[in-house]
Image: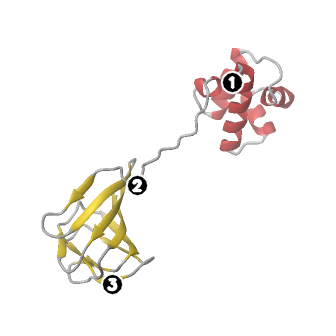
Amino acid sequence: MQVVSLVAANVRRLRERAGLSLRELATRAAISTSTLSTIESGGGNPGVETLVSISSALGVPFSELVMAHEPDVHVQRANEGPVVEAASAPFTSRLLLAASGRSVTEVYEATMEPPEIYRAESHTVGATESVIVVAGGMRVGPTGAEVEIGPGDRATFAADQPHTYQALARGTRMVLVMSYR
């Protein structure tokens, strides 16, 4: 792709992502609306100074305007991801997603077979769990306050205290979302 076409596509994509009109971005970048329109349509040959002004107005590095943009898509196939098995019950979990920032969120696919009970220890203060049953049924929650949930049901509870999992049907599958503050 030519640099001019690449710049045109990137400026438009970034402007739209920022929720700005042509006029708003042009004003912020201190350029005319017609100049910005020409750049976005792939016309002209904008100078470095103009592109620096646009990148500053968008709050992005200069390279975002001149480099090819690849969609940020991450695929994890059904048989991929670390699998952990519990020693005390037929309970397995496979990490589906982990995200961090001010808090950390982990998403697992888990399976369990009856009748054993998996007793989980307390996690860090402020941790929560959400269990979403995909197939089968579960009795889950803080020890002494467990609830029964079925396919499509979700139970969310404080996980900074002991809690339990018990499958109520063979082939029980769930999605487990762990959130840490």
Q: In this view, does 105 lie to the left or right of 11?
A: left
Instruction: Kindly report which numbered mark, 3 or 1, lies closer to the viewer in this rendering.
Output: 3
**Distance (Cα) linking label 3 and label 1:** 58 Å
> Which residue is drawn at the image coordinates 53% and 40% (left, top)?
72
User: Does residue 104 appear anywhere in the picture?
Assistant: no
The image quadrant that residue 63 belongs to is top right
Looking at the image, which residue is at 36% across and 50% down?
80
What element does badge 2 sit on? loop
SS at badge 1: helix
The residue at the far left in this view is: 88
Residue 3: x %, y % from top left: 70, 20
Return the residue at label 1. 53
Mark 1 or mark 2: which comes first in sequence? 1
- Which residue is disc 3 drawn over? 148
Q: How crowded is mark 3: few (under 14 residues within 10 Å), some or many (20 or more)?
A: some
Q: At 46% from the left edge and 47% from the top edge, which residue is drawn?
A: 75
Label located before the other in sequence (3 or 1):
1
Residue kind at label 1, given as amino acid type: Ser
Q: Which of marks 3 and 2 is nearer the N terminus?
A: 2
**Residue 78 has which mark?**
2
Front residue of 135/25: it is 135
Query: Which image quadrant: the C terminus?
Result: bottom left
Observer able to see residue 52: yes
Instruction: Tell whether label 2 touches label 3 (CB within 8 Å).
Output: no
| Quadrant into which the N terminus falls | top right
Snapshot quadrant of residue 86: bottom left
Q: Which residue is drawn at 33% across and 50% down?
A: 81
Q: What residue type is labelled 3?
A: Glu
- Residue 150 position (above or below residue 61): below
Q: What residue type is labelled 2?
A: Ala
Which of the pair 105/33 is nearer the observer?
105
Residue 46, placed above or below residue 165: above
